[in-house]
Structures are given as structure tokens and as C-alpha cells.
Image (tube, grey):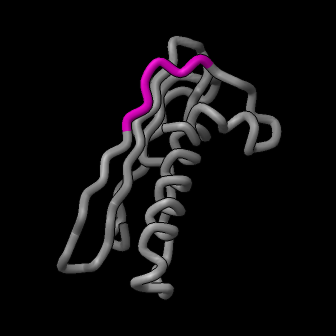
Amino acid sequence: IMAAKKTSQIIPMCHPLMLTNVDLNFTINENENKIIIQSKVKTMGKTGVEMEALTAVAAAGLTIYDMCKAVDREMTIKSIYLLEKSGGKSGHFSRPLKKSD
């Protein structure tokens, strides 16, 4: 959650935003040895918050890696992508799910 709030300090050209909600969801898939991380970010402003959501997911993945590296240093962090957004100049976007997701 803190990563979403600090995005403007991490990513060049991102302006500080008043976020009204940041939610992270973790789904553990033991059969495939993976954790799926999803973030949902909201603001009352008229701008998109996709960079804040993506930053939150990336930081959560790095945190999990840091906590688990003593057990497995071969972990990978991959497939960070925007699933859906609304608002902002570019309007609504919804990424179709692919088999590799």
C-alpha cells in the first residue's frame, strides 16, 4: 500500500495523487508454486492510477521475494500488467486474459 502512495517519488513524471483506496489481494496457487498479486487503486481525481496499482504489485512481489529468498533464490517475478482501468484521459481499458496469464 505504501508503494502506491509513494509512486510519485519512485517513477519519474508521476505526480502525487490523493488516493482514496488501495487494496492488495494475494492468491496462493500451491499446485503451480505461485502467488498471484492484484491491486485495486481508487482516487476521486480525474486522472488514472494505473502506475500506482502497478507499483504496489511490484513492491509486493519484491517483498515476498525478500521474505522467501532464504528458502529459494530461484524465484521469479513476472507478468506484471494492467488488467483494467477507467477514468483519466485515455478512458476505459480492459486487457483480455491470455492463456499464459
Task: Place residue 50 in its image quadrant.
Answer: top right
Q: Is residue 78 visible?
A: no
Q: Nearer the viewer, residue 78 or 46?
A: 78
Q: Nearer the viewer, residue 66 or 43?
A: 66
| Residue 19 magenta | yes
Image coordinates for residue 26, horizontal then vertical, percent:
30, 53
**What residue is at 66 percent from the left and 38 percent from the top?**
7
Q: Is residue 98 above or below residue 50?
A: below
Q: Position of residue 11 (x, y in %)?
A: 74, 44
Left-right relation of 98 to 74? left
50 sits to left or right of 25:
right
Q: From the viewer's perspective, is 2 left or right of 21?
A: right
Tell me the quadrant of the picture where the C terminus can be found.
Answer: bottom left
- Looking at this rendering, what residue extends furthest in the right direction? 13
| Relative height, residue 15 to residue 11 (above, below) | above
Rendered location of residue 41, percent (x, y): 46, 31
Which contiguous range is marked in magenta? 18-23
For residue 56, say whether it is visible: yes
Task: Please identify the dominant SS of the magenta region.
Answer: strand
Which residue lies most toward the left here? Answer: 31
Task: Give me the residue at 53% from left, 62% from top.
Answer: 62
How many numbered discs?
Answer: 0
The picture quadrant where one finds residue 98 is: bottom left
Query: Is residue 33 highlighted in magenta?
Result: no
